[in-house]
Image: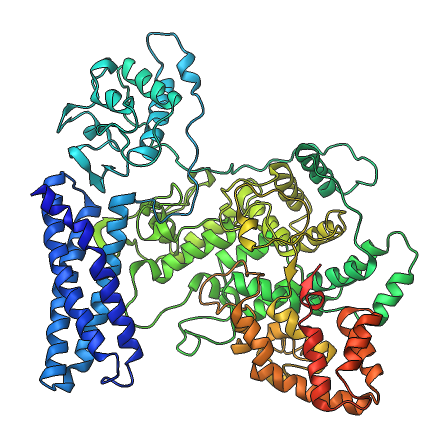
Amino acid sequence: MQFIGRFHIVLVHFPIAILLLATLLEVFSFKNFNSKYRPSIHLAIIIGGISAVFSAIFGYVLAQNEEISGDTLDLHQWGGFSTAILSLITLGLHWLVLKKKQNSKISVYRFSLFATSLAVIFTGHYGGSLTHGDDYFSFSEPKATSDKSSLLSMNTDSLSIENQIKLVGEVRAIFAHNCYKCHSSNKQEGKLRLDQKEFAFEVGKHGKVIVRGEPENSELVRRIKLPRNHKDAMPTKGKALNEDEIALIIFWIEKGAPWPEGSLQPRLFRVAKMEPRKPILPTPTGDLKNPIDLWVNEYFKQNRIEWKPKVDDRIFLKRAYLDIVGLLPTASQIIAFSKDQNPNKRASLIKQLLAQDEEYTQHWLTFWNDALRNDYTGPGYITNGRYNITDWLYTSIKQNKPYDQFAKELLSPKEPSKGFVEGIQWRGTINASQRVEMQAAQNVGQVILGLNLKCASCHDSFISDWKLEDAYAFANIFAEERLEINRCDKPTGKFADTRLLWQNFGNIDSTASRAKKMEQMANLLVRPENGRIYRTVVNRIWKQMMGRGIVESPDEMDNEPWSQDLLDWLASDFVEKNYDVKELIYLIATSKIYQMPSEGVKSTNLLYDNSYTFRAMARRRLSAEQFSDAVSQIITPIFTIKDLKYTGTKPNILKPAFARASLVANNAFLTALGRPNREVVSTSRDSQASLLQALELTNGERLTNVLARGAKYWKAQFKTRDVIIRVLFSKALGRLPNNSEMKTAQSAMDENPSIEQIQDLFWAVLLLPEFQLIY
């Protein structure tokens, strides 16, 4: 029977591929049921349905004979049976429509087919977890456990309770990384579980796996020492244990396999320290005076990296303008800056830009709108299921509100700032992880604390040590009543307590009102003693200006920073300078490292690689808003004043020269260039060009109309071809065309150019990397 059961592995791929193919073809036939794909769909459903039934039968036989059990297997089995039943129902409905001409059942048939496809995906997910482990779909690197334990050098016969806890913690970490895939609550091969004390010492299929004090008689030791190609070798999947790991397990069993009550589950992932730390600055050297440069210099020395000369004034000016106010400098500003002989002119320029309150605010509004998922239109706004915070946000940025106060007003909000924690009240049925209290926990964790709780909102996280109970306990702060814990959207009957994620921050009164609990949370989280919240925000600002965070991703602050000293110093200095965001921007923008040439990468994925080495600012593409505003500056406005969705408070009505893109509603043009829909938190935008962006820039209706309108205006404004070429290069690139560029442009245009020729010139210049990239 075991041999027959193993045909499940051969058959299982047929329903996956064929039923999904049938669904895809059905989508293509949505407008015409009797399309040319109908015979293929019918054949695919027949083959897929039959193979799904046999896969389920053989899979059941396999499970009974391989001695595998656990929650993952149960979910996989139920998914397989559901797929088989649904596929037969779908086949029957399709036959009725096709052969019996019962067209009224088309909608029911299609619903059944799509449900079958979802069942296939669900079943395949848990099948992959069975064969490859629950962390197969995780992209996070777990903490290494191969370092030799200091406990192995101890020669004492007995261990203190403290050392016993440390020893079992290290052993369980080895189990977690190498054994839990097959021997935990989700799956128990050979009826063996190693994740809990009460199960680890039970008698398994082959007797006692762990014999206290007798490693030579412990089946576990025998198996982990076997050659890799031996049929009994453990672990059966992944890498074999190394010598140090085997020695540690043997040592643990020799000492009686201590497992004290209350010993904690080991942390499997890196956890950043919470407390603030301000390391002593290195001694200034040469022209390195800025504290940032002193820390970067230490990093460069360790990695044998040479400093490069600063960029020229034109590149620096464009970079500073775009980063601080989101606009291009004018040609006259570039000329004046280049002629200025003041050695401190760059620092003076940064101060001048930071003092341009309206321009600064309109640029940084985009950054915070993305992070706080604040928008002008979209789901929830019409039905009062979502609240706009633009007025509060605009005013806070313009006032340069201290960040501790800014965060406090988000976490314990009054009416103007409540939209962030109130989230989106989705219409219709939603899963438990999307109720507004859990949205608040997820969003506060992600934006304010640099923490991903989305996985732990449904089940124990696969990418961190956070548990489902932790997420619900944090979500309870935002709830009027205690929340029932739902695991994978199924009620458990258990109710979470109410607490912060880190209990050493302080306690929350679970009996208090929702408003009072949020006030307590806000006061505890923004304290200077919480180094995490301030490391998170300085890392976000650094990434915004330098293209890559000190920690990447900025939403996962437990990841390794490329310079812990720089991150810690910036966070502590930020607190000491009264949480001043503009002061932080000034410090970054006046550093030598900010003024060095940027560095391009073949793929943005390399910026997130674990082996990343910082050498310079990452080269970035103009954001959707920066590109739009630049075109509006240079040629003619993309958006008109009528497009503005925010015009300021009543005593201070905004009157911009053109409608800044940050103040208009999202649309197809901005979406194509990278603006997110803001229904979820978005703290990073991909700087790499996409096919959608290329199509929009070359063939999009909005840009085409804008350039045509601009060409008509320019033809009336400037009379000759050469003047148009020189003015365009000056405005767009901050320089005149070189001889080669001038000749190329002249050859494409008449002396008295047509509107179409001017429009083509606009396109050619706007698509240049020199225009689109921040060098």
From the viewer's perspective, is residue 120 above or below residue 714?
above
| Residue 704 falls left or right of residue 532 | right
Q: In this view, does 654 lie above or below 322?
A: below
Q: Quadrant of residue 631?
A: bottom right
Q: Which residue lies furthest to the left in this view?
A: 1
Give the residue drawn at x 76%, y 42%. 307
Where does residue 470 sit, x and y in percent of width and height?
35, 45
Determine which quarter of the picture holds residue 289: top right
Quarter the N terminus occupies: top left
State which quarter of the image contains the C terminus.
bottom right
Q: In this view, does 395 lie to the left or right of 427?
A: right
Asked whether the viewer can see residue 656, the reply is no
How many tags in the picture? 0
Q: Residue 620: percent from the left, percent from the top? A: 64, 59
Name the image colouring. Answer: rainbow
Residue 334 appears in the rendering: yes
Residue at image coords 83%, 41%: 287
Q: Is residue 330 left or right of residue 457?
A: right
Q: Position of residue 142 (x, y in %)?
A: 42, 38
For image coordinates 39% across by 45% down, the residue present is: 463
Q: Left or right of 285: which side holds 108?
A: left
| Residue 398 % position (x, y) | 67, 65
Q: In this view, does 296 lie above or below 22?
A: above
